[in-house]
C-alpha cells in the first residue's frame, strides 16, 4: 500500500501559504494606489532637487533628445520611397527618449505628471510654487539643450549634407499645421507621455519596450512634443526658414499648452481621480 503523506504542521502550512502569497505578488502588477504613490514620490523628489541639478540635467536631456531627429534623418536618407517608410522613420524618434528616460534626465513632459500628483494630493501655495519652479527650470534647460544641439548641427561640419537636409525635411512638418491643429496634436503627445510615466513602475524589465512603443506612437501619429519638437524648430530657425514670431507664437505656445493639458488636465486628473478614495 502507498504511504500516506505526513500531515503538515500549522507552522509549515503558514510557511507554504506565505511562499504562495509571495509568488503571486511577484507575478502580479502593482495595484493602482501603489503606482500612484510611486509616481507621487518621484514628483516630490524632483521638486526637492537643487535648481543647479535640475538645470544641468535638463540641458543634458535637451541635447540627448536631439538624437531622435538625427536617427530619423539617418533612416529617411537610407530607406527607399515606400508606403511603410514613415513608420520605419518613426522608429528613429524613440532613440532620444530612450537616452533621456533610461538615464533619468529631467524632461519637461515627464514632470507634467510626476510633479502634479503631489500638488493634487496637497494643494497649497508652497506646492504650487515648487511646481512652477520645477517646470520653469526644466523647460528652459531642455530648450537650451536643443538649441545647443541645433547650432552644433547647423554651424559645424559634423553632418553630411544629406543627413542635414534629411533633418530639415523632417523639421518642416511642424510648419504644416495651424495653431489649433498644433495645440490638439500636442495634447495627444502630452497624454501619451504621462501614460508612459504611469506605466514605468509596473513595467520593471520591460521599460525599454514601453518607451519605444509610446514614443513611436507620438512620431507615427504626427503628434508634437515640446522638447523633441524644439530641436526641429531651432533647426528651421537657424536655417532661416522660420522667424522668431513663428517659433514663439505658432509653435512654442500651442505645444507647451497642449502638452500640459494632455499630461496634467487629462491624464493627471484621471490618475488622481481613480485612487483619491483609496489614499
Image: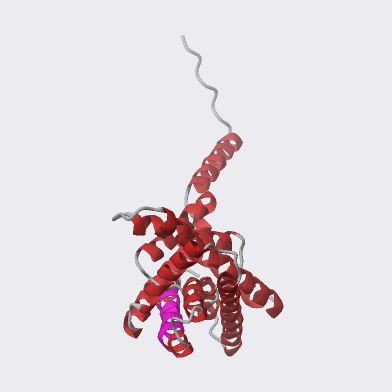
Q: Is residue 279 magenta?
A: no
Left or right side of 195 for 143: right
Question: Farthest residue toward the top?
Answer: 1
Query: Which residues, given as a range, are shown in magenta?
Result: 250-268
Measured along the vertical axis of the image, is residue 103 above or below residue 276?
Answer: above
Q: Where on the picture, by quarter, is residue 169?
A: bottom left
Q: Is residue 270 among the parts visible in the rendering?
A: no
Measured along the vertical axis of the image, is residue 73 above or below residue 13?
Answer: below
Q: Where on the picture, by quarter, is residue 53?
A: bottom right
| Nearest the eye: 210 or 64 | 64
Q: Is residue 138 among the parts visible in the rendering?
A: yes
The chief SS type of the magenta part is: helix
Left or right side of 220 for 153: right
Where's residue 19, x and y in %? Answer: 56, 40
Left or right side of 229 for 60: right
Residue drawn where x is 49% and y is 45% of the image: 27
Where's residue 242, x and y in %? Answer: 44, 83
Q: Is residue 257 magenta?
A: yes
Where's residue 252, x and y in %? Answer: 46, 83
Where's residue 82, x and y in %? Answer: 30, 54
Amino acid at each position: 500500500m502507498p504511504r500516506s503523506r505526513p500531515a503538515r504542521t500549522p507552522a509549515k502550512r503558514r510557511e507554504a501559504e506565505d511562499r504562495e502569497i509571495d509568488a503571486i505578488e511577484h507575478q502580479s502588477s502593482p495595484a493602482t494606489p501603489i503606482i500612484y504613490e510611486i509616481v507621487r514620490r518621484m514628483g516630490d523628489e524632483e521638486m526637492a532637487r537643487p535648481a543647479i541639478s535640475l538645470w544641468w540635467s535638463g540641458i543634458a536631456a535637451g541635447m540627448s533628445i536631439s538624437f531622435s531627429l538625427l536617427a530619423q534623418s539617418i533612416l529617411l536618407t537610407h530607406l527607399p520611397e515606400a508606403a511603410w517608410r514613415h513608420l520605419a522613420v518613426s522608429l528613429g524618434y524613440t532613440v532620444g527618449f530612450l537616452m533621456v528616460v533610461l538615464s533619468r534626465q529631467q524632461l519637461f513632459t515627464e514632470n507634467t505628471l510626476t510633479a502634479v500628483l503631489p500638488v493634487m494630493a496637497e494643494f497649497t501655495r508652497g506646492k504650487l510654487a515648487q511646481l512652477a519652479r520645477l517646470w520653469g527650470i526644466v523647460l528652459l534647460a531642455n530648450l537650451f539643450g536643443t538649441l545647443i544641439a541645433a547650432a552644433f548641427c547647423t554651424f559645424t561640419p559634423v553632418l553630411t549634407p544629406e543627413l542635414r537636409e534629411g533633418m530639415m525635411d523632417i523639421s518642416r512638418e511642424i510648419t504644416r499645421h495651424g495653431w489649433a491643429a498644433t495645440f490638439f496634436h500636442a495634447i495627444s503627445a502630452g497624454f501619451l507621455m504621462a501614460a508612459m510615466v504611469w506605466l514605468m513602475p509596473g513595467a520593471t524589465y520591460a521599460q525599454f519596450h514601453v518607451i519605444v512603443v509610446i514614443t513611436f506612437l507620438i512620431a507615427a501619429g504626427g503628434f508634437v512634443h515640446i522638447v523633441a519638437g524644439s530641436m526641429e524648430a531651432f533647426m528651421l530657425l537657424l536655417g532661416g526658414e522660420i522667424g522668431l514670431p513663428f517659433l514663439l507664437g505658432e509653435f512654442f505656445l500651442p505645444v507647451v499648452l497642449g502638452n500640459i493639458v494632455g499630461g496634467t488636465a487629462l491624464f493627471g486628473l484621471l490618475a488622481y481621480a481613480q485612487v483619491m478614495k483609496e489614499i
